Image (spheres, coloured by chain):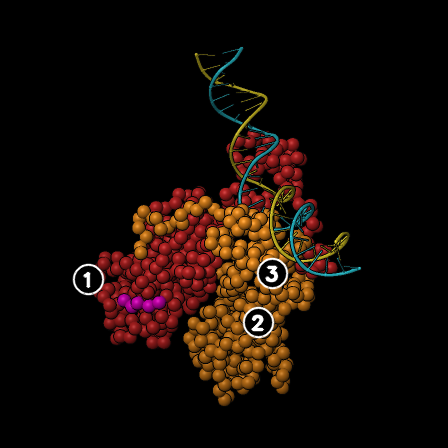
Chain colours: A red, B orange, C cyan, D yellow
DNA sequence: GGAGCTTGATGAACCGTTTCCATTGAATGT
DNA sequence: ACATTCAATGGAAACGGTTCATCAAGCTCC
């Protein structure tokens, strides 16, 4: 029992909870009719609908979600399971999803799986018993499958899984965009910091780089191992990869580096800095993701921005049947765009 | 095994949902008894309790939360309203709360207020109608009050409000700790980057700095305006503040700077770097918060770490009545600790 | 003009729990 | 031994909506 404070002002006067029957009585209709008004059921006269709405407003009636979801089939709750909420990409995703859901009268239950398949399964089970109307999942990296009751829609985000409906940024074309930007500036020796090779998005990003490099003469040959470094997505790995790519004589090392994540890019900038290579004068750097941090570096990072808000909005729209579920092996890809910072310029003449 | 196109494995076979009556029938008891077992009601024989538990297990019975919260008074749901989920401090708070809640069989509904009082009120209203069992609130900065139905416990976190039960890090003593650390290293001219002056935590942190400085001879005088810069909590403001504090001849400028946030501290490091002041050789820097980013800088930032997990765990425990609600004007303060990085050392001799 | 439809609204059943009250059998008091 | 408590359990009402089977009334169409 919470302490009965002496503070009267804090609490709303405890009104004798108004229920659907009160509304019905006041409006002179049946509870069934009120219910249909509430759910925008078409078979209610406009005139009657208006009257009932009036009474609802007047009484300040709020339907009880528990009761609704018990008899009815909808809970107006969406579950979202992500590996790690402290990852800025995911926290922005959750925040955007919350916004999108709120616009439709839905709320979000968040859960973190810590990139652990067993925890992920447990979380999904909990959401199932909560009767959520849909699940947004960023699956953990271990290979695994998902057990779901029939009829509960799930949409996999970012880390696509074959066999599940998915939605993600178009990493491949996004990276291509970024690399082409560098090409247009005149760069030819463009290094690439790849993500961990087992990661699906990392593979897509590498593809995008190769796509772009193939366009230039000899690009295929140039994009050899001496220009590609594999690294985890984090800052320190990016720094090490940058060191590796830049530890060569000036006319041998890349004049530009595309990193698969902003954190890598920032690490790489640090490496360049430590080597005395000025950015963007002697080295252009482009990141990927568009996290807030990317605009806080000095100079501000040029990066390929993922459309997180659009991804979240689309995921919610799909779960709410406002938009068709994509085919199991035909995910929706949303295009990225370049956010120009101050880390790119034309290469210095050799 | 990779999910086959005809995804049999994806869905659990649609079992004819097992309810409490099924359990009761199988166990040869009444539904009331099963319910009492479920809720750990004391008046059930151990023997019977065990048998019912067995059946529950065997049937894989999961009680329906909607039904429970409709008839009963608990929803096993906790609402958490924060200004901005992309702020690393808050996202860690939410994640920790989710963990703590999960340990008690509770789930979390997150909502963001965008630091807007009206939105905050709306969110709280939604949570109320969801019948959450408690609310964790990081209030927005505008001055305002909170309307709540009687009996719904709320706990204000981080940004304490007089008149509401609260829990937060002990900012004042935390800062004192950090400054004393600098004092022990031998620093005397210690600059301070303060937070925005209207912010309650910022005021507390400034107090902590003054507390520590008063201990040294002439400290009160030294901690004058030339050593204190006010700034927003963000990176760029920290950089500007750092520029301001450091734009003096070497023996006039501070040998150490304590920043009120890690982001400020990182901005300040950038400023020092741009001025050619090596860290920690010629300048020690200490931050506040302990966000993950602080360990990703080069050199790693020494910072005063807020006990976010403990704050979250305590907030949840209080809402679940595992721990008494603190008095309205007597918030729980949890102590911070120093996380030693590489940005502090003894001052160079003048 | 009446059979067949359609439309709009009704009222009761129902969803799956919790909780109240009644009941029972055992334990206790005298 | 009998009345009185008490603990453990059964049975059913209640919670607050949604939905389904009905029904009355207004139309259409030969």
Label 3 vs label 1, nearer the camera: 3
Depth order, front residue of B3/B238 = B3
Q: Is residue B167 visible?
A: yes
**Disc 1: which chain?**
A
In the picture of the structure, the residue carrying the numbered disc 1 is A218
Residue at position x 62%, y 32% in the image: A29
Depth order, front residue of A228/A7 = A7
Residue at position x 52%, y 35% in the image: A41
Highlighted range, magenta: A228-232
Q: What is the number of the mark on residue B194?
A: 2
Circle 2: element type: strand
Same chain for the residues under marks 3 and 1 in the image: no
Q: Is residue A153 visible?
A: no
In the picture of the structure, the residue carrying the numbered disc 3 is B320
Circle 1: element type: loop
Circle 3: element type: loop
Label 2, label 3: how many angstroms apart (C-alpha)?
Answer: 36 Å
Residue B152 place in picture, x, y as percent: 64, 55
**Disc 2: which chain?**
B
Of the two numbered discs 2 and 3 on the same chain, state the one appearing first in sequence: 2
Label 3, label 1: how many angstroms apart (C-alpha)?
Answer: 66 Å
Mark 1: few, some, or many residues within 10 Å (few <14, many ≥20)?
A: few
């Amino acid at each position: 029992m919470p302490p009965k404070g002496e503070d009267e002002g804090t609490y709303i006067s405890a009104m004798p909870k108004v229920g659907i029957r009160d509304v019905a009585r006041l409006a002179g209709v049946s509870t069934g009719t009120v219910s249909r008004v509430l759910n925008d059921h078409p078979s209610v006269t406009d005139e009657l609908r208006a009257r009932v709405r009036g009474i609802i407003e007047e009484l300040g009636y709020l339907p009880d979600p528990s009761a609704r979801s018990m008899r009815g089939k909808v809970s107006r709750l969406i579950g979202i399971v992500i590996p790690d909420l402290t990852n800025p990409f995911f926290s922005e995703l959750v925040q955007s999803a919350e916004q999108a859901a709120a616009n439709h009268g839905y709320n979000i239950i968040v859960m973190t799986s810590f990139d652990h398949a067993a925890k992920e399964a447990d979380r999904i089970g909990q959401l199932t018993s909560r009767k959520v109307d849909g699940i947004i999942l960023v699956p953990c990296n271990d290979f695994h499958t998902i057990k779901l009751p029939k009829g509960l829609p799930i949409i996999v985000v970012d880390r696509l899984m074959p066999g599940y409906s998915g939605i993600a940024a178009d990493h491949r074309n996004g990276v291509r965009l970024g690399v082409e930007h560098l090409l247009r500036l005149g760069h030819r020796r463009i290094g690439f910091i790849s993500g961990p090779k087992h990661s699906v998005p990392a593979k897509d990003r590498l593809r995008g780089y190769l796509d772009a490099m193939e366009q230039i003469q000899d690009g295929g040959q140039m994009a050899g191992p001496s220009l590609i470094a594999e690294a985890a997505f984090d800052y320190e790995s990016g720094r090490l990869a940058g060191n590796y790519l830049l530890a060569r004589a000036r006319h041998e090392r890349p004049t530009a580096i595309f990193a698969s994540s902003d954190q890598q890019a920032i690490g790489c900038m640090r490496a360049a800095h430590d080597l005395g290579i000025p950015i963007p004068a002697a080295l252009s750097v482009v990141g990927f993701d568009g996290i807030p941090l990317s605009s806080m570096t000095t100079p501000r990072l040029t990066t390929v921005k993922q459309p997180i808000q659009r991804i979240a909005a689309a995921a919610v729209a799909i779960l709410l049947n406002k938009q068709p579920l994509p085919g199991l092996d035909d995910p929706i890809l949303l295009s990225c765009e370049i956010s120009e910072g101050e880390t790119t310029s034309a290469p210095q003449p050799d």
